């Protein structure tokens, strides 16, 4: 996707029909290999299709992020992560489900996500966010999407759409207007196998 030809203005919040139209625009851009900025629980995120190598590469380039670190993937419901949950014991799967929707990201054995999304690891970080619009974006897309903090490496994550625009400019194809859920900072990350908190 050509960055210059695909750059979109902020969607306008307000009427339900306008919100639905903005969500459709964001999904269309994701499906075309674009990068969408969106609000989440505590900070703004950059979203893309985790199975599109070029799109993931663009997100990494925008952030200046080491590909080996991997990226968080979010879903609209726990059912978006059935392959990952099915590989866990019942107790662990139930514990993960009970934490969602919420600001808890779980590191689980990877079942299907490509190396360019996981950083080549045998695990993947997954979450159903406690933010209705972020869940709606994944649900409308029809499956998991990458969602990583909207910032350059070494810079603080953006907390407003205006901060995204100032920090990332035209590198982002579309900003889906919205507000964070008010959480301070990003989600907590927990290793599902050991129960250890990683962040």
Image: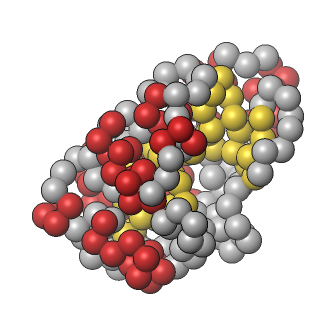
The relative height of residue 45 versus residue 184 in the rendered view (above or below) is above
> Which residue lies at the image location 62% right of the left edge and 39% below the top edge?
126
Q: Nearer the viewer, residue 87 or 14?
A: 87
Left or right: residue 65 compared with residue 90: left
**Residue 88 appears in which quarter of the rendering?**
top right
> Which residue lies at the image location 85% right of the left edge and 23% below the top edge?
91
The relative height of residue 105 versus residue 166 in the rendered view (above or below) is above
**Residue 6 appears in which quarter of the rendering?**
bottom left
Which residue, as the protein is rendered here, is positioned at the far left?
5
Left or right: residue 163 compared with residue 19: right
> Which residue lies at the image location 53% right of the left edge and 33% below the top edge?
118
**Residue 53 appears in which quarter of the rendering?**
top left
Q: Does the rendering let one see residue 113? A: yes
Residue 86 percent across, percent down from the top left: 65, 18
> Which residue lies at the image location 37% right of the left edge and 33% below the top edge?
51
Residue 15 percent across, percent down from the top left: 38, 78
The relative height of residue 35 versus residue 152 in the rendered view (above or below) is above
Q: Does the rendering let one see residue 24? A: no
Q: Nearer the viewer, residue 6 or 63?
A: 63
Left or right: residue 136 compared with residue 183: left
């Amino acid at each position: 996707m050509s960055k210059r030809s695909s750059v979109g203005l902020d969607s306008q919040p307000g009427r339900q029909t306008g919100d639905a139209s903005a969500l459709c625009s964001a999904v269309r851009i994701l499906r075309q290999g674009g990068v969408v900025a969106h609000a989440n629980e505590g900070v703004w995120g950059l979203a893309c299709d985790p199975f599109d190598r070029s799109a993931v590469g663009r997100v990494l380039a925008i952030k200046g992020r080491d590909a080996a670190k991997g990226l968080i993937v979010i879903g609209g419901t726990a059912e978006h992560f059935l392959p990952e949950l099915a590989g866990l014991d019942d107790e662990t799967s139930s514990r993960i489900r009970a934490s969602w929707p919420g600001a808890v990201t779980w590191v689980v054995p990877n079942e299907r996500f490509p190396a360019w999304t996981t950083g080549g690891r045998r695990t993947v970080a997954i979450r159903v966010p406690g933010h209705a619009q972020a869940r709606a974006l994944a649900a409308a897309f029809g499956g998991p999407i990458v969602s990583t903090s909207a910032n350059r490496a070494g810079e603080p994550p953006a907390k407003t759409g205006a901060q995204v625009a100032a920090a990332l400019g035209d590198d982002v194809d579309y900003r889906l207007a919205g507000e964070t859920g008010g959480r301070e900072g990003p989600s907590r990350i927990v290793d599902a196998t050991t129960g250890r908190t990683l962040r």
